Image: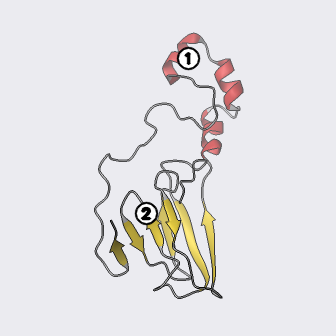
Amino acid sequence: MHKDHANLPYDWCAITALGSFDCTKGGHLIFWELGLVIQFPPGSTIFIPSASVTHSNTPIASGEKHFSMTQYTAGSIFRWVDHGFKSDKDYYASLTKEGQKKVGNVTGYPGVFQGNPHPYPSKPAPASTGAGFHRYG
């Protein structure tokens, strides 16, 4: 189980399941904070905020094959543009004391976002009870 911490936290990541496996018995997507286990058959695509939601897959049977193709946006690309096409180090070094106050608590660590680190609502989305969705816990 993991979150994709390098991805843009408030953007979507596309995941496509590929391979030859029985999706009723394995290869499900698990969204841990939401309490969801979702059947995810080969050829299916889902969009998730992969930096903000802990996710994983269930195992597949011996002899089956499962692959995932992901498409995502690295958060560092947006920081680079927002920082006037400069690295974090160069950007923060170029700020005056007043500029540093404007951007907030400057940590100097790449990947640490200033302001709200989790732009989603504090309440999780309601669990779906549609076909292929199973609530656990």
Q: Quadrant of the C terminus?
A: bottom left
Question: Count of labels shown?
Answer: 2
The crowding category of the residue bearing disc 2, from other C-alpha atoms within 10 Å (few below 14, some 14 to 19, many at least 20), is some
Calculate the distance from the C-alpha at mark 2 to the C-alpha at mark 1.
39 Å
The structure's colour scheme is: secondary structure
Q: Position of residue 38 (x, y in %)?
A: 42, 74
Callout in the foreground (2, 1): 2
From this view, report whether residue 22 is shown above or below residue 121: below
From this view, report whether residue 70 is shown above or below residue 131: above
Q: Amino acid at mark 2?
A: Phe
Q: Which residue is mark 2?
A: 31
From this view, report whether residue 121 is shown above or below residue 39: above
Q: Amino acid at mark 1?
A: Gly
- Residue at 44 percent of width and 78 percent of height: 39
- Residue at 61 percent of width and 47 percent of height: 6
Secondary element type, mark 2: strand
- Quadrant assignment, res 109: top right
- Quadrant assignment, res 16: bottom right
Q: Position of residue 31 (x, y in %)?
A: 43, 63
Secondary element type, mark 1: helix
Q: Which residue is mark 1?
A: 99
Q: Position of residue 8 (x, y in %)?
A: 55, 48
From this view, report whether residue 3 is shown above or below residue 21: above
Q: Position of residue 57 (x, y in %)?
A: 52, 70
Q: Is residue 35 left or right of residue 27?
A: left
Q: Earlier in the sequence, mark 2 or mark 1?
A: 2
Residues tagged 2 and 1 counted as in contact (Cβ below 8 A): no
Q: Nearer the viewer, residue 64 or 104?
A: 64
